[in-house]
Image (tube, grey):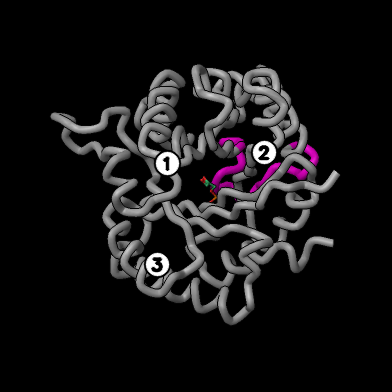
Amino acid sequence: MVNARLPLIAGNWKMNLDHMQAIATVQKLAWTLDEAKHDAGASEVAIFPPFTDLRSVQTLVDADKYPIAYGGQDLSVHDAGAYTGEISGAFLARLGCRYALIGHSERRQYHGETDETCQKKVEAALRHSLIPVLCVGETAADLEEFGASAVPIGQLKAALDGVSPDADIVVAYEPVWAIGSGQAATEEQAEQVCAALRATLAEMLGEDFAGRTRILYGGSVKSSNIASFMRQPNIDGALVGGASLDVAEFASIVRFYKHVI
Ligand code: 13P
């Protein structure tokens, strides 16, 4: 069967690049993709810069019509009010964000985000017409204790509780042990969990939802391993951390279709 899902290659910059560096990076990325004749019909590009960069990114993308989507690395469960330090989904939407990352393992680990918080953030994103990119993944200890799929499936079920089958969401499977370690999952490992996540989506929200929802793999993705992931039937793209800060490397990942046979 032909895979009708448009691959998504997303760069999570984490807490790197201030707004001046963001301007230079986005310009360079746009030029590199243009020069390489990137086919926007073959893969969608998205970046997740720090909040303080978003206005600069918006200005550039709007002015020069760059084919680069962007989103926030997090959002508040609340829409407005006395929540010091929080960023509303309404503000992200006003800045032209298409996506919002939710439940990244670094937020779960360092900021105490629970499945319940993630569920509220998914609702908040959808309320503001942002596409949630819900991150799920097991730690090395989870892997040993529960196997590969149990924890990500549990996180998925909890965060998507109450979501409408009409909603547009993206799921990112990021095994915590593969993030920033240089030790990516094998394509078989990643495919196995992504297939299990898709089966869970089908159970929860129907075949149509499962068939159109993109599931990304993340964790030490590079230009040298992206092709093997993209050959898998249930992997529809990548959430890239470290390698997204290197424009040439990230552009090569975006153009994976040139090296997937
Ligand atoms: P690395 O690509 O640096 O392993 O990070 C993955 C990640 O956490 C993306 O969200």
- State yes or no: residue 61 in magenta: no
**Residue farthest toward the front in the current orientation of the protein:** 166
Q: Quadrant of the N terminus?
A: top right
| Residue 148 appears anywhere in the view | no
What type is the residue that disc 3 sits on? Val
Disc 2 to disc 3, C-alpha distance: 27 Å
Q: Secondary structure at mark 2?
A: helix
Residue annotated with mark 3: 61
Disc 1 to disc 2, C-alpha distance: 17 Å
Q: Which residues are magenta?
A: 173-189
What type is the residue that disc 1 sits on? Leu
**Which numbered circle lies on residue 14?**
none
Q: Secondary structure at mark 1?
A: loop
Q: Secondary structure at mark 3?
A: helix
Please report contact status of discs 2 and 3: CB closer than 8 Å, yes or no. no
| Residue 206 appears anywhere in the view | yes
Disc 3 to disc 1, C-alpha distance: 18 Å
Q: Residue at x 39, y 55 (%)?
A: 49
Task: Report the side of 71 relative to 81 (left or right).
Answer: right
Residue annotated with mark 1: 130
Residue 156, image x and y in percent?
Answer: 57, 24
Residue annotated with mark 2: 212
Q: Residue at x 41, y 27 (%)?
A: 123
**Residue farthest toward the left in the current orientation of the protein:** 82
Which of the two labelled residues, at mark 2 and mark 3, occupies the earlier sequence position? 3
Q: Within the image, what quadrant is residue 206 found in?
A: top right
